[in-house]
Amino acid sequence: MGKNNDISRRDFLKIAGMAGSLAAVGGAAAGCGRKSTAPADVTGEMTYRTNPSTGDKVSLLGFGMMRLPSVGGRSAREGNEEIDQEMVNRLVDYAIAHGVNYFDTSPAYCQGMSERSTGVALSRYPRNSYHIATKMSNFAPSTWSLEASVAIYRNSMKELQTDYIDYMLLHGIGMNGMEEFEKRFIDNGLLDFLLSEREAGRIRNLGFSYHGDVEVFDRLLAEHDKYGWNFAQIQMNYLDWKYAKKINPRNTDAEYLYGELARRGIPVVIMEPLLGGRLSNVPDNILEMFKERSPESSVASWAFRFAGSHPDVLTVLSGMTRLEHLQDNLNTYSPLRPLTDDEFAFLQRAADLMMQFDTIPCNDCKYCMPCPYGIDIPAILLHYNKCINEGNVSSGPEDPAWKKARRAYLVGYDRSVPKLRQADHCISCGQCSPHCPQRIDIPKELRRIGAYVERLKQSRDR
């Protein structure tokens, strides 16, 4: 299906040398959360893992097409700007030239435009040279009929310019409990349809991505003999390994999720290896630990090494808006240097220290957006977390650091979030919270932050 506009051999050979033009990618490091660094040459060879279900050779680094660059230089998830297709093509070219062959998208990403952009970028290559992962993102009740859900599936193939999907996921099982899972996939016969598509070869691997209610996760694994899951996608990083449930009671520790999948021989795809950037912008005292341990390594590379060092991990997804993020990740996995037991213990100590900071578990996924009242929810929560990590949120005027904290917070807040999109404009309509994979009580947190900001302003005016 679709025309294969292959790039020429000469153009392909130019890709490895195009770092200079790619370095012009601008904008915030949304999704990766990393500060801009000078691009580093990628000299090693990519590490690959084999999917026992199909024998696929899959790059350990997977390209998450969730945070594609926009024409304004930011992630296309941050506003209404169009995707910068030329830059997407260049990033994809660079990734493929350095061994990446797994590309993960969804009908819900980038204002609904990620699949189309992904299809344009990948269709220039032979179809058997890459693996496409997309999702059945039938979240809205209006899409729960079999007819509507199948239409989403058919449209995914059209947008991706393909007649088969390598990795198809039931998107976000568990987000709203068992009843919604059954309505989305069981009662309407949709899962049976997807199984028949796998049997016909139009889906090569069938799996699911998991957030939320562990009862749904456990049910799908208990029915593994019935459905024969080819893979599963979970949130896993060194903080969520033992602390996911402590951070949010509705979450499940990654140690349990990974262990249950590995025990059944189900390959694991990792999402949120950086927790929306939180594990690359760590508190200053923890940053010093990392730099003392390995001065030349990025903080992000530790998190990616953690994810990749588990043997049943098939690929680790990263939403890469900028070249330096892509290059850093390529260097981490080209090839992977697995963590030693001592390094695993070091990361556990780092996680223990991070749990002392009272941050909000926002991963900047932007599923809560758009807010009908224009509130920039992720920017508000992430600014609060950033200030906690940097020690710029103090208890009150009695704290000696109050004046410095007050100024740092207010100046940064106004720069990060336009005044009409700040927390004090939230009316607590509650439309956002049901869409949050982390189950954050968003209106409650916005009220808390709004009250905190007001205290800071009143103190300034005295």
Image (spheres, rainbow, N blue to C red):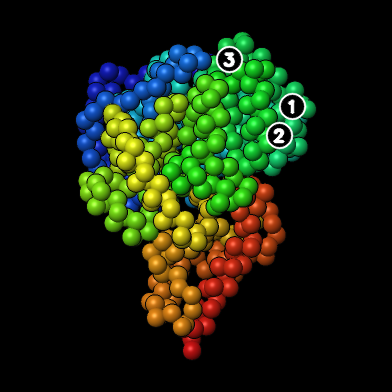
Q: Which residue appears at 48% of the width and 75% of the height?
A: 395
Closer to the camera, 11 or 233? 233
Closer to the camera, 115 or 354? 354
Residue flagged by tag 3: what amino acid is it? Answer: Arg
Relative to residue 308, is residue 276 depicted above or below? below
Q: Earlier in the sequence, mark 1 or mark 2?
A: 2
In the image, taking residue 436 as reference, residue 11 lies left or right, namely: left
Closer to the camera, 283 or 61? 283
Q: Which residue appears at 61% of the width and 33% of the height?
A: 171
| Image coords of residue 80 (percent x, y) | 52, 49
Q: Is residue 370 visible?
A: no
CA–CA distance in space, label 3 to label 2: 23 Å
In the image, taking residue 350 as reference, residue 151 lies left or right, namely: right
Q: Earlier in the sequence, mark 3 or mark 1?
A: 1
Q: Which residue appears at 45% of the width and 22% of the height?
A: 131
Question: Decide: marks 3, 2 in contact (CB < 8 A)?
Answer: no
Q: Quadrant of residue 302?
A: top left
Q: Which residue is mark 2?
A: 181
Mark nearest the camera among 3 and 2 is 2
| Image coords of residue 140 (percent x, y) | 70, 39
Question: Decide: marks 1, 2 in contact (CB < 8 A)?
Answer: yes
Q: Which residue is mark 1?
A: 186
Could you say which disc has been placed on residue 202 in the image? 3
